[in-house]
Image (spheres, rainbow, N blue to C red):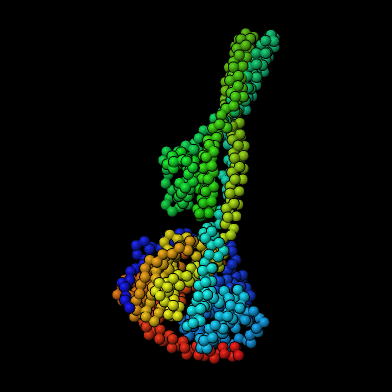
Amino acid sequence: MTTPTATNVAQGDAHVDVQAGVVHGDINFYRLPPNPSPEEQFAAALNYLDARVRDQARTLIEKAIAGGHVTTEVQFYRLIALLSGRTLRQLAPEEVDRLTAISASLPHLDDHDEWAAGLKAIIRLLATVHDGEANLVVKEIDALSQRQRDAIYGHLEALLEGAVQEEMWQKSIVLAQSQRTAGDRFNRVWKFFHPAPAQPRTMPVQPADIPLRDWLRAGAGAAVFTLSVVQMIALLAGGTLDSFLGLLAGLIGLAAFCIGGADRYYRGARLRTKEAQVRPPRQRREAPQGGFAQKVDRLFDRYFSRYVPQGTDRTYWRAQTAGIQRHLRDEVVELYREQRIDADRVAWLVRHLVGDVRRQWERDTLTAYRQQLRVPARSKALYIGGLALLAAGSLWAVPDVIASAPLYGAGWLILAAVSAVPAVRSSFRIVAERRRVADDQAEKNDKDSARWAAYHRWCHKLSDKPSDTEMAAWLESDRKVLVDQAMQQYRLRPSHVIGHAFIEAPAPSCKKARYPQGPWRYSRYRLLLFLLTDDGVRQVNIDLDFETSAHRTTQRLNYRFDAVAAVRIDGIATRQQTFELTLFNGEPISVRVSEPADEALQHDESATKIAELSLDAAGLSHTLHVLEGVAAEGKEWVKHRRRRADERLANLASAIRGLLD
């Protein structure tokens, strides 16, 4: 048996850098109510068992039994939880004693009870260690309901040795192959890592901001102008009708000028505002590192680079939409910055906004506002015609006013002109601000409708997000298939393998998510698979892309039991833990198995508990137990383990024979 030089699998690009985690809202899948009943504890235990969090499942089942909830179904899953993923010889002495005590305490198993039938199948499976009735046991398991059958093949495939182990392993692999792609996995698994989308928001419409001076100028100017006109009418009282008609024409021209001018003024101001929104910024402001604004920047950069209109050069597209990107980016940052919302939760909105810009570009409506805000012919006619009529009327009436009272009339004419100019300007601004509020509200309503529609479409797309138990079933199926492939590579049969164990860690730059009170799931894993045989250890290091189930073997090592110098876990689970395996003739093999708990915990969660659940789901304690025994005793560990286990298994056989008679 050769012992290749081991390399550190955490070197180089193996630095584990996990993206921010997603906690899926207030899902009561694992959460127990205060003072739970035994039935509620048992229901939660089944969820944890399906999630392969075996230690927690065993604890809750024992609590349920201690509370008086003792049925054949409970006893069935009690044995499943105790034996899951291990051979009988891998059980600790106290676990074999507990298994013996449980078996001895079982009542008579009625064949008419489906759970009793399942329980009897497990008991018969345990008895096969000694009497070897493999075919009968497999047939009995196959006759069970699918739920019981899948539980046995899914959890107890490695339980025994010899022919029955070979057959059960093959059935387990067939089950794993079918479960690996069940439930439309590859179209749904990514949704588990996607956070709940933040509800859409739009910028509130700013109320009309009209300075007091504009109100005063408009009001005072109108009052003074009106007084001046009344005085001029009085001066013309003794004059000809033509003078009155000239004054009336001037007033009508002034009114037309105000109507057309107000519309022209508003459209010009609105156009300048719109142009400022699309004008490329002179220089890009860099957002603070690691902040919400920088993450939103990256989202806009990503989607503007991805959503390029058909037939458009990417560089040209980015240059022409730089101003729009900056405007939309500033809006999103302003809307969500203070709400402690992760940037990934608004990614759907960024996609919607960028997609809308692309659609407008393709339809050539991105600058349609320029056409909409062009001054119409009617407003131009009122503006120019009114100004001309005002001038003509003034030339007609002014001489008669001055002729009737030279000094007095000239004074009223000057006062009318001086009061009219600021009054008209202020009235333009007042009208424009009121129209701005109305148009902004209409635009806001359109944005609200479009964003809520996009939000509901995205929520519908995420509505079939996988459950945590589906994620666990897919991961367990991947692991079994990888074990089977590794055994084929080494030309090993299941009966040649004393036991197998995994070290399961998040891969670099992976995404992670979990249910409340549940373990972390990762989009990419770094797996260390250990196959223990009579000749030594076969180690296979694997990178698994969980979203596609694609995997890559990064290293294969073979070493004798006595080549293992030490096995240990360094660090605190809530901060960072590193698994380290040291060989006598090589560098330490190390990999991080947990990362700092930097996510927001819910009110009833603790970082320590979440870390424990995650390590439980990864099977770390079982793997450590096996490897620490190998490191401590070498090959003798296998012999001692078998000898100690056989003594207790004899007692177990005696306890279960009575149940089968």
Quadrant of the rendered structure where residue 118 is? bottom right
- Of residues 161 and 350, the one nearer the viewer is 161
Q: Residue furthest front?
A: 135
Question: Residue 48: x, y in percent?
Answer: 55, 72
Question: Residue 547: x, y in percent?
Answer: 49, 61
Query: Quadrant where the N terminus lies?
Result: bottom left
Q: Residue at x 32, y 75 (%)?
A: 3
Total labels: the figure holds: 0
Give the vertical position of 659 relative to 243 (above or below).
below
Left or right for 565, reference 406: left
Quadrant of the rendered structure where residue 78 is? bottom right
Q: Residue at x 46, y 40 (%)?
A: 312
- Of residues 193 and 139, the one nearer the viewer is 139
Q: Residue furthest left?
A: 585
Q: Is residue 242 visible?
A: yes
Q: Is residue 617 visible?
A: no
Query: Quadrant where the C terminus lies?
Result: bottom right
- Of residues 400 and 286, the one nearer the viewer is 286
Question: Residue 268: x, y in percent?
Answer: 54, 30
Question: Residue 526: x, y in percent?
Answer: 42, 66
Q: Residue at x 59, y 51 (%)?
A: 457
Q: Residue at x 57, y 69 (%)?
A: 30
Give the vertical position of 32 relative to 100 (above or below).
above
Give the vertical position of 488 relative to 642 (above or below).
above
- Of residues 542 and 334, the one nearer the viewer is 542
